[in-house]
Amino acid sequence: MALKIHGSLATPATLRVIVCLEEKGLKYELVPVNLQAGEHKKEPFLRLNPFGQVPAFEDGDLKLFESRAITQYIAHMYANCGSKLIPLDNKTMDTMSLWMEVEANHFNEAGSKLNHELAIKPMRGMVTDKAAVTEHEEALAKVLDVYEERLKVSKFLAGNSFTLVDLHHTPLIYHLMRTKVKVLFEARSNVAAWVINLLTRPAWRKVRYLIIKQNNVSAS
Amino acid sequence: MALKIHGSLATPATLRVIVCLEEKGLKYELVPVNLQAGEHKKEPFLRLNPFGQVPAFEDGDLKLFESRAITQYIAHMYANCGSKLIPLDNKTMDTMSLWMEVEANHFNEAGSKLNHELAIKPMRGMVTDKAAVTEHEEALAKVLDVYEERLKVSKFLAGNSFTLVDLHHTPLIYHLMRTKVKVLFEARSNVAAWVINLLTRPAWRKVRYLIIKQNNVSAS
């Protein structure tokens, strides 16, 4: 099998690449990286990503890291497979680029910190920092206010079709919808409808099944 | 004049777009946004960027924000003007995408915090947080270790030609080279040679002249 993703189903960044592969209907091998054992900070993983973060990706001889660089590669290289993730017209492409930056610099910034405080820390028996939660909840609410306005104009962020920028949001939204900040998404009608569209896509349902299956194995 | 950039020469993000316009040899109008007066947090600026951050950009009817989305737009839309900033072959393009993510998620993360502590705070009469400086110096050193290895293989980050990913680094490097973390760049021979290549480009010299001219006006 040519496509290999090295990572963990426990991280939104790994899931971002997996859901992209599923949208494209591509066959791939998930090579598990044991984060608890620190495998990502040691050789041989560091040869795939010198920053010691999952995921890393191989397509034959090509090696990549950084989840959003990997998804862009897949979307362009396999443009003719499965879902179209890249707009065909330049204007929609420019709009997608803009919202991809917003996802990385605003949505992910607040959302991943909330996921850390509200999901990861409790799971590891660590104490949630309530002041940090308040701060990042406020930041996320502001981001979602902007999204609400944007999603009045179009069904998805770049236009009326699902693209890579929507996909980039899905894993973290899935995790956040299982915490108390779910209400921030549900209180905004356009955002709420968009979230349902993201989480009910067949590709995401497959990824969700993988996550649940893995959690059941870990728990048993 | 069709191209307008709304921003401030005091921010690396605004300079990132200006140096891109200079590399392309395009005519543009810089519409100054007074950050000290909080103009970026008020109307009419918020209509250009609801997140209230500079720069914002207009090309006729097209409006964009997020500096790296703007530079990508300029590089693609004006591909045939001035410096080639986008690689022509797919493999170099994939490599550029990867290092663009590294710049945004690793280099900029550490570098902008150091710039804030070591340049902006002293300028505003605020006290530098020494613990934060130590933490981010360590992070920047690790990033530059990875760059040193990469730049052994090629003169620039995506390959042997200057591209958008190198350009994205220039403004922050210019500011950091005026602080004590300059030694982190100078201690790594390949990084040091790359920095000289970036800062001696004619387009950056023009931008540097604009910064110095503006600083002289502010000081007089």
Image: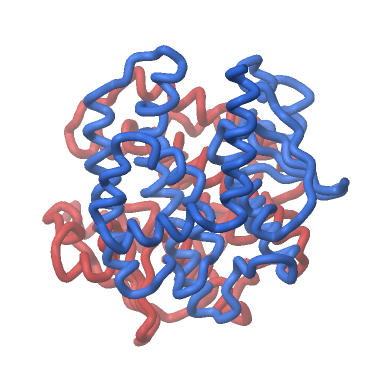
Chain colours: A red, B blue
Q: Is residue B91 above or below residue B118?
A: below
Where in the figure is residue B211, as x and y percent of width and height?
59, 36
- Residue found at x 64% / y 54%: B20
The percent coordinates of residue B146 (x first, y second) are 28, 60
Q: Report the front residue among A11 and A47.
A: A47
Residue B209 vs A92, above or below: the answer is above
Q: Position of residue B118 (x, y in %)?
A: 36, 28
The residue at 70%/39% (across/down) is B56
**Quadrant position of residue B89:** bottom right
Instruction: Count how many numbered circles sit on residues in the image.
Output: 0
Q: Where B20 sits versus B135, above or below?
A: below
- Residue A153 visible to the viewer: no
Residue B159 visible, this angle = yes
Horizontal side, residue A64 vs residue B29: left or right: left
Left or right of A76 on screen, residue B30? right
Residue nearer the viewer, B1 or A29: B1
Identify the image quadrant of residue A179: top left
Percent across and percent down for residue A65 are 37, 65
Q: Residue furthest top?
A: B125
Residue, x 74% and y 71% (percent of image)?
B80
